[in-house]
Amino acid sequence: MKQNLAGKTVFLTGGSRGIGQAMAKRFAQAGANVAICSKSSEPHPTLPGTIHETAEIVENAGGKALPIVLDVRDEDNINAAVKQTAEHFGGIDICVNNAGAFWIQPSMETTTKRHDLLFNINERAAFLVTRACHPYLVKSDNAHVLSLSPPLDLKPVWFQHTSPYSVSKYAMSLYALGWSKEFAEDGIAVNTLWPRVGVETPAAVVHGGEDLRKEFRKPTIMADAAYAIVSKPSREFTGNFCIDDSLLFDEGERDFEQYSVVPGSELVPDYFVPTDVAAPPGVKLSKFRLYDI
């Protein structure tokens, strides 16, 4: 694989399992240094994965790892983790806002505690992490900010059933839209990435059950898409709301069955994917959606 991230440093939140772990491995295969930041330093009772396990994966894949215990709700913790990363590796080139809180429930069924958790981990953390990384990103010759958040498709359906979650995730995308212009003069690219269909992660299997696995893709598709984004020239690719398979199709990928957990299965479109963003040719999607739009 190309080592075109050799010497580059990635500050990655939510890196202990799932999509974050897959991204850490893919960046490492391209030669990157990866700061793996998450609360999971010890094994979880039901969810596999820790920052130390991801660090071992990164090292085995050819990268350099720095596992950091990080609570993205804690501003001082964020600032310290970013500083530690920059001092350890000599800078930061890529900031990936991957940590996220999930809650698909109506507004009136959302407690204040749950509401605040959504905004602290989604909106607020993306702001604080990016702000902390910014002084180092401006010194990079190819700086990127990548947030795992959806395209801005302002149809009521995305808010009708789950406004608190939707607003917290859309806030991340709105930041990306603004920052892509605000940071342009400094050559810092800002983009978002979202999956076409459900992704097999430990949390998804716990919440959805083993039967849903056939509807999912492997997290490697998000990792490959993230790599494709952050390896692009930052002054040429910014302000984009990317869908994983559409982006990879544009990059020349044609074999999307490799990403299916159960090859040949119909895949269920993920929440937030606009109906007018067509899937690549040959991708089999179920007509079922979480909500009828």
Image (cartoon, grey):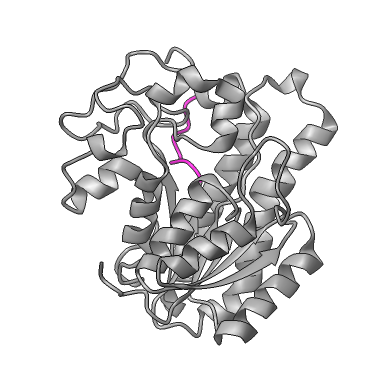
In the displayed structure, does residue 94 sit left or right of residue 252?
Answer: right
Residue at horizontal 47 percent and vertical 41 percent from the top: 150
Residue 274 vertical placement versus 285 (above, below) = below
Residue at horizontal 40 percent and vertical 29 percent from the top: 216
Query: Of residues 143 and 81, which is closer to you in this image?
Result: 81
Query: Would residue 38 be seen by someone viewing this image from the given angle?
Result: yes
Residue 232 vertical placement versus 246 (above, below) = below
The x, y position of residue 81, in whole percent, is: 70, 71
Query: Of residues 208 and 105, which is closer to you in this image?
Result: 208
In the displayed structure, does residue 236 sit left or right of residue 44?
Answer: left
Residue 48 vertical placement versus 237 (above, below) = above
The x, y position of residue 241, in whole percent, is: 39, 48
Residue 189, by quadrant, is bottom left
The x, y position of residue 117, in whole percent, is: 76, 41
Residue at horizontal 62 percent and vertical 37 percent from the top: 167
Task: Find the magenta span and give its range.
Answer: 149-155
Residue 48, by quadrant, is top right
In the displayed structure, does residue 70 sit left or right of residue 167?
Answer: right
Query: Of residues 64 and 276, which is closer to you in this image?
Result: 64
Residue 39, by quadrant, is bottom right
Assess whether residue 151 is covered by the magenta stretch. yes
Residue at horizontal 66 percent and vertical 29 percent from the top: 103
